[in-house]
Image: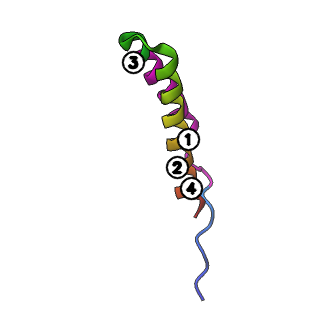
Amino acid sequence: MERPPAPSNNPPAGGCLVAIGIIAGAAYGVVAGHATTALLIGTGVGIAAAVAVWLRERR
């Protein structure tokens, strides 16, 4: 019988995706004139990307 693959010793980090989303949202918001709205949208996109990475690596 084959053994399942061992868990990765270096799991990918999704926190950088959250940080990039926040920074990109804030930068776009300053340019567009809607800083808070864009910051929240950027945060949501970053969190969604981090959750997607987590779900992909969870298997």
Residue indicated by mark 2: 53
Write down the region rendered in magenta.
9-28
**Residue 37 has which mark?**
none
For the residue marked with disc 2, what is the amino acid?
A: Val
Describe the element under mark 2 as helix, strand or loop. Answer: helix
Cα gap from disc 2 to disc 1, whole angstroms? 6 Å
Q: Main secondary structure of the magenta part?
A: helix
Cα gap from disc 1 to disc 4, whole angstroms? 11 Å
Residue indicated by mark 4: 55
Q: Nearer the viewer, mark 1 or mark 4?
A: 4
Image position, residue 39 (x, y; %): 51, 22
In this rendering, the answer to whether 12 lies above or below 33 is below
Describe the element under mark 4 as helix, strand or loop. Answer: helix
Q: Nearer the viewer, mark 3 or mark 4?
A: 3
Where's the C terminus, which quadrant?
bottom right
In this rendering, the answer to whether 42 lies above or below 32 is below
Along the viewing direction, whichever of 26 and 7 lies nearer the viewer: 26
Say how the picture is coloured.
Answer: rainbow
Residue indicated by mark 3: 28
**Residue 14 has which mark?**
1
Q: Are marks 2 and 1 in contact (CB under 8 Å)?
A: yes
For the residue marked with disc 4, what is the amino acid?
A: Leu
Q: Judge left or right: residue 58 versus residue 23.
A: right
Q: Residue at x 43, y 23 (%)?
A: 24
Q: State yes or no: residue 24 in magenta.
A: yes
Along the viewing direction, whichever of 5 and 14 lies nearer the viewer: 14
Q: Are marks 4 and 2 in contact (CB under 8 Å)?
A: yes
Whichever of labels 1 and 4 marks the residue nearer the N terminus, that label is 1
Looking at this view, name the residue that lies furthest to the left: 32
Number of other residues with Cα within 10 Å of mark 2, as a class: few under 14, some 14 to 19, many 20 or more = some
Along the viewing direction, whichever of 17 and 30 lies nearer the viewer: 30
